[in-house]
């Protein structure tokens, strides 16, 4: 479970996220949808502890996020970003097993987990010995997802995970990602500006504009009943273009 | 498991530091002779070495490691025990401004510093004015005062003589000379111009080899303007008390070297017919019947020794600089504000001319009780260390700072702490840049290390300096070529390390289609 209580963020006096409350239930997939600069990525970064809220509280599984709890909370998080954030000096295998090795997992435990994840993310096992720069964009994102899932996170944070991919690859990965979400039942907070993606993944969509969540609800409801002009325009522009 | 990389890093750091700081075994030495960086001084130093060895002492001769100031300071600091000096230099340079006119005052001042002075070796190496024999007879001059008659004379003087307060300006005043055609040139150039008839008169040292070679006539200093530059030994009183053989060795040379003898010894060396050791040995054999058994060292042996000395300088400066430089680079990246100051300071260090840095460091190193001159000189090592820092610090900084923020943030959210992040992620990713910095530093270092010879630290600079002094191009090349090869070799070694340790993922960019 992930809970925001009056959370806000300001950079150098400019408010980028207005105070907001939000509760994401265990296993729920929530998509933060909005144009760039609306504050959606900032919210994700605050959960990951990469950026401290200017006001309010964030609770991860009922643990208040603070300097003291940060490292414990991060153990419950999986984090995937647009370019994958892979370690260029490590092979695919080394990338995904870095943390379990660091934590002293046994070889058998690592291997078991690895085969589950390879299968789940559809990552070609022949590519495990390759370095990130020897992988395709899609493979990189699958790898990044595998790395994020390895330690069984309670919450998965994804920041435009498909943003850098070609449309075709994107569609395939979207499907696989959705399967993964369904299989693991993890709480997911995903950030995107892509309406189709939101529709594909979300149990609940939070449409954001200028640091505010302007409408939230199931995808169909957003499409059918836009709460204001901004949402209507944002929705229709992408429906027409896609 | 968790700390494996950290343990590896600490082990590597310690290994570098130990390899860099470990001292080589030192020979125990009973007497350390010094000499200044000109032929005559080196020949005299060799004479002392041979005499002291003949008396059964273990002797080391720090050859040609500096000018008056450096060598005298080294004597006072106890880094050498004895070196040849000139009385005029003692009064005019060492005790400059103290108006030392008589021998007793000079002796007392030296004694206060724990320094003794020997009797004259038998010759005076004073300034003199010289003409070719032919020109002198044409003009009919034999004394300096004769010059008053010929104000149109063309004169070429060394810069030192031209600028010194007790040089040309004072001489001109004293003799009331009117010459205006006076140019400041290099000593060798002046000599060549004189032989070519382009100038009429130059300044020389009275024992210059060129006097003999070029049949030059020295003008008589008829009003005794020039102070006496009698060659003497300056030695530490404690050394002579400790080793009575030293006194005996010095006495054997009392009054034995005449001005013409010294001229011909200088000439033999500067024309390349003899090394300083050979010239000194032959003289001692002739004069004192000394049985000189000089093991003849071939040029290969000599160069091999200098290569080893050179590598030692590089090792002791580069390896610690790698450790310190990387540490500083990391600090700069972590605290950019102080980092700018550190980067600027390290950059500034690099702009200090090497000679100035060496001279600035000398007293500091000596004051700290380290060996400031000679073999294994801490001064040379420290200066080289300073020059190594900039490329290493800068490349460590840019290497780490240039890592994509997404990569670092991913590592952070994965749960890697600051140390694990540095050791497992940042340093390995920055490795190619870091190695490039080390390579630059290493190649520069090999070049700079030749300057160690200026303060007697040995290395391949020694044959270069000596080659310049005695005008022997093959000797210069014998130092310069191995130095260049050494630099290439070191570069190759680092390339090899890079090839071995940098993972494929950091080497090439490949695009793969889905």
Image: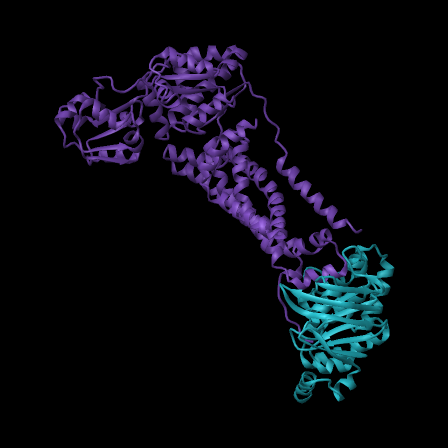
Chain colours: A cyan, B purple
Q: Residue at x 53, y 16 (%)?
A: B57
Q: Residue at x 69, y 44 (%)?
A: B12
Q: Residue at x 13, y 24 (%)?
A: B140
Give the answer, above or below, for where B82 lies relative to B198.
above
A99 left or right, relative to B289: right
Percent x, y of residue B512:
66, 72
Percent x, y of residue A36:
65, 75
Which residue occupies the foreground of this view, A155 or B226?
A155
Which residue occupies the foreground of this view, A197 or B34?
A197
B109 left or right, relative to A78: left
Percent x, y of residue A11:
64, 64
Which residue occupies the foreground of this view, B340 or B346?
B340
Which residue occupies the foreground of this view, B482 or A169?
A169
Which quadrant of the rendered structure holds the C terminus of chain B?
A: bottom right
User: Image quadrant of residue B253?
Assistant: top left
B289 left or right, relative to A172: left
Percent x, y of residue A175:
78, 80
B203 left or right, relative to B50: left
């Amino acid at each position: 479970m992930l809970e925001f209580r009056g959370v806000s963020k300001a950079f150098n006096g400019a408010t980028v996220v207005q105070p907001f409350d939000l509760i994401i239930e265990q296993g729920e997939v929530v998509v933060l949808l909005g144009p760039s600069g609306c504050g959606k990525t900032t919210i994700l970064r605050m959960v990951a502890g990469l950026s401290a809220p200017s006001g309010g509280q964030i609770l991860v599984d009922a643990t208040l996020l603070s300097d003291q709890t940060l490292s414990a909370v991060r153990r419950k998080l999986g984090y995937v970003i647009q370019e994958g954030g892979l370690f260029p000096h490590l092979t695919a295998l080394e990338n995904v097993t870095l943390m379990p090795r660091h934590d002293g997992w046994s070889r058998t435990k690592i291997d078991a987990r690895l085969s589950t994840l390879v299968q789940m993310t559809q990552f070609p096992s022949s590519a495990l010995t390759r370095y990130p720069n020897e992988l395709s964009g899609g493979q990189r994102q699958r790898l990044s997802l595998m790395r994020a899932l390895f330690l069984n996170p309670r919450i998965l944070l994804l920041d435009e995970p498909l943003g850098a991919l070609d449309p075709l690859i994107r569609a395939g990965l979207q499907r696989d990602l959705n399967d993964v979400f369904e299989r693991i039942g993890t709480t997911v907070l995903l950030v995107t500006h892509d309406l189709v993606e939101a529709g594909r993944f979300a149990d609940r969509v939070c449409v954001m504009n200028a640091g505010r969540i302007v409408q939230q609800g199931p995808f169909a409801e957003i499409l059918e009943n836009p709460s204001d002009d901004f949402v209507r325009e944002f929705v229709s522009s992408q429906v027409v273009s896609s | 498991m968790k700390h494996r990389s950290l343990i590896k890093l600490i082990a590597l750091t310690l290994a570098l530091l130990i390899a860099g700081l470990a001292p080589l075994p030192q020979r125990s030495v009973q007497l350390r002779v010094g000499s200044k960086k000109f032929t005559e001084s080196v020949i005299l130093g060799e004479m002392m070495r041979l005499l002291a060895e003949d008396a059964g002492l273990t002797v080391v001769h720090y050859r040609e490691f500096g000018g008056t100031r450096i060598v005298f300071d080294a004597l006072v600091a106890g880094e050498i025990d004895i070196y040849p000096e000139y009385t005029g230099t003692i009064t005019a340079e060492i005790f400059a401004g103290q108006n030392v006119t008589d021998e007793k005052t000079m002796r007392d001042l030296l004694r206060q510093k724990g320094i003794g002075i020997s009797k004259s070796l038998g010759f005076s190496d004073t300034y003199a004015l010289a003409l070719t024999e032919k020109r002198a007879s044409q003009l009919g001059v034999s004394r300096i005062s004769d010059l008053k008659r010929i104000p149109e004379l063309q004169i070429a003087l060394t810069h030192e003589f031209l600028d010194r307060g007790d040089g040309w300006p004072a001489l001109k005043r004293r003799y009331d000379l009117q010459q205006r055609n006076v140019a400041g040139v290099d000593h060798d150039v002046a000599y060549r111009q004189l032989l070519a008839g382009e100038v009429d008169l130059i300044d020389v040292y009275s024992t210059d080899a060129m006097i003999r070679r070029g049949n030059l006539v020295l003008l008589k200093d008829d009003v005794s303007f020039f102070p006496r530059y009698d060659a003497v030994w300056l030695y530490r009183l404690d050394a002579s008390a400790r080793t009575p053989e030293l006194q005996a060795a010095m006495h054997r040379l009392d009054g034995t070297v005449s001005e013409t003898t010294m001229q011909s010894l200088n000439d033999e060396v500067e024309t390349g017919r003899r090394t300083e050791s050979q010239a000194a040995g032959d003289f001692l054999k002739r004069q004192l019947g000394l049985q000189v058994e000089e093991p003849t060292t071939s040029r290969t042996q000599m160069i091999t020794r200098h290569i080893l000395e050179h590598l030692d300088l590089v090792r002791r400066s580069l390896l610690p600089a790698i450790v310190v430089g990387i540490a500083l680079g990391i600090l700069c990246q972590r605290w950019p504000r102080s980092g700018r100051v550190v980067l600027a300071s390290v950059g500034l260090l690099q702009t200090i001319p090497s000679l100035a840095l060496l001279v600035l460091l000398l007293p500091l190193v000596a004051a700290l009780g380290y060996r400031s001159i000679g073999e294994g000189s801490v001064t040379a090592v420290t200066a080289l260390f300073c020059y190594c820092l900039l490329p290493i610090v800068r490349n460590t900084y840019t290497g780490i700072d240039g890592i994509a923020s997404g990569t670092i943030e991913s590592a952070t959210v994965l749960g890697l702490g600051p140390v694990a992040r540095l050791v497992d992620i940042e340093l390995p990713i920055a490795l190619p840049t870091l190695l490039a910095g080390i390579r630059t530093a290493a190649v520069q270092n090999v070049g700079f290390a030749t300057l160690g010879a200026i303060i007697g630290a040995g290395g391949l600079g020694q044959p270069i300096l000596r080659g310049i002094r005695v005008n022997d191009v093959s000797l210069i090349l014998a130092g310069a070529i191995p130095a260049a090869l050494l630099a290439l070799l070191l570069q190759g070694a680092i390339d090899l390390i890079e090839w071995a340790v940098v993972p494929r993922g950091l080497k090439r960019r490949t695009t793969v289609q889905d």
